[in-house]
Image: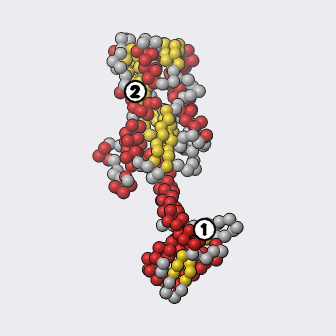
Amino acid sequence: MIDSVSISPKGGTFVELRQLRYFATVAEELHFGRAAARLHISQPPLSVQIKRLEDELGVTLLHRSTRHVELTAAGAELAARLRTALPELDASFVDLQEMQAGQRGRLTVGFVSSANYTMLPAAVRLFRERRPHVRLDLQPLTSAEQLDALLSGSIDLGIVRDAAPTDTFDFRDLLAERLVACVPSGHPIAAQSSVRPAELARLPMITFPRSLMPGYVDQIRSLLGESAHHLHITQQVIHQETALSFVAAGVGFTVLPESVTRLQPGSITAVAIAGSPQTRLSTVTVPGRDAPAAAAFLACLDETLQPETERPQEPPEAQV
């Protein structure tokens, strides 16, 4: 319970929330001794605080005698209002404290679509179990879109792929996985255990816009080396699902994270790339940004990437 808040009505008058609580208790008991006992203080300090409240307000709240305490009209009005106002204030203070602790409020998370095939669904379920009073908004965005959204404040946390570190953001690696070449199942390369980048460079390719996925596109270009300057790009897409549909249609091949094999149709084969090049998912935040629930969401992401036997169990009280 918070008692030390000062309230300043018009005219520069200052009263303490504690004084209002004291008065509300006296108004209920109509007896200073009983009120003092309920408040766990002695009677003289209680009388002093009520007198100070009256002096600050410039209003007589109580008629006192040696044997009798009676509310004035102003006192009865204030007591009636405090019966509603004090519980609402207490509830507001609890809400604010829970927001500061990341137990209440709102968290907006951006994510690249490929995070859906790894840790994101399990992390979202875990977070919603542990933070039921936090509204979690999920926004599917490309890596570049997430960085812009972080700067504008429209998201609190991002999950990006192969983003280049900068001083503007805090990056933290979540998951590294192999890149694979996705080809139609009837293609000769589909029968190989692995494919060399030079072989891929001779094939028609489905790729992604660098303006939206600069790190990922640069990773693929680096993989293909000098051959990247002479690619035959047949289609440029934004979503991995769209890339796979074009591969299935025979438009060309594409390079995707290995986790994509969880949703690839039978008409597509994922082939390992020689040298086992990797791609990484990272979280990204703005340094100093006040988003208390973000830390809890990051913890959920970390836990879902651990073997189940190694996952820490959050205490029951933190799950409420």
For disc 2, the neighbor class at 10 Å (few under 14, some 14 to 19, many from 20) is many
> Closest to the observer: 58 or 242?
58
Residue 266: assigned label: none
Image position of 96 with respect to 262: above or below:
below
User: Quick one: label 2 or label 1, which is nearer the N terminus?
Assistant: 1
Dot 2 lies on which element? helix
Q: How many tags in the picture?
A: 2
| Residue 187 visible | yes
Tell me the amino acid under the disc marked 2: Val
Residue at (55, 15) in percent of width and height: 230
Residue sitting at the far left:
309
- Residue located beneath label 1 in the image: 6
Tell me the mark number nearer the camera, choosing from 2 and 1. Answer: 1
- Residue located beneath label 2 in the image: 260
Tell me the amino acid under the disc marked 1: Ser
Image coords of residue 304 (percent x, y): 37, 42
